[in-house]
Amino acid sequence: MIFVSDLSHEPNIGIFWLVKENGKIVFLVDKVPVSQGDCHENMTTWGEHYNFWEQCRSKNKKKIPSRVPMWSEYEEWPRGRVVYDVGAQLFTVYADRKLLTKTMRVAISEEFCLPLLKTRYSSDAHYISIRKL
């Protein structure tokens, strides 16, 4: 697997996928520190799966490297989102069940610098993929 690392120790929020391209499994993320997220009522979020995927696809057409498989759509791959509940001071990871294994929880937690005791994981019907890795 290829991981995109962040040197910041501030927890991050954003969106992510696990995709397979040319035989390599890639953990693809779009994230920002929680302090730079978009706050809507009591939730701080970042990113939109469709827009980020299409942005990567358009870059690929211009011969700029991207890790998005051009031959597939964003909702085909296991994906998820990390949000922050300001009132509860709690991070929630919503994800495809395929990504809620112990190994992937550790990978998500490390990639997003999430505090162990202030993070919960939840499957979500919105994030059901058709691809197997």
Image (cartoon, grey):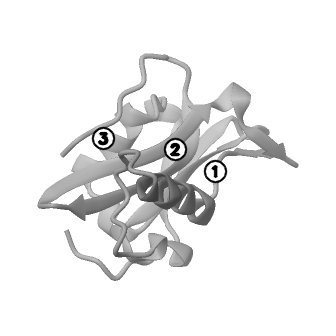
Q: Is residue 33 visible?
A: yes
Q: In this view, does 63 lie above or below 98?
A: above
Instruction: Of the two numbered discs 3 and 2 on the same chain, state the one appearing first in sequence.
Output: 2
Is residue 34 shown left or right of residue 106?
A: right
Instruction: Of the two numbered discs 1 and 2 on the same chain, state the one appearing first in sequence.
Output: 2
From the image, tell me which residue sits under label 1. Answer: 47
From the image, tell me which residue sits under label 2. Answer: 30
Asked if labels 2 and 1 touch by Cβ distance under 8 angstroms, the answer is yes
Mark drawn on residue 106? 3
Q: Can residue 94 be seen in this view?
A: no
Query: SS of the residue at dot 3?
Result: helix
Write the residue at 58% across / 66% down: 50
Write the residue at 35% across / 45% down: 65
Q: What residue type is labelled 1?
A: Gly
Q: Please identify the residue farthest to the front as the structure is shown.
A: 62
- Residue 72 lies, in percent from the top left, at 37, 75
Of marks 3 and 1, the one in the foreground: 1
Q: How far apart are marks 1 and 2 (CA)?
A: 7 Å
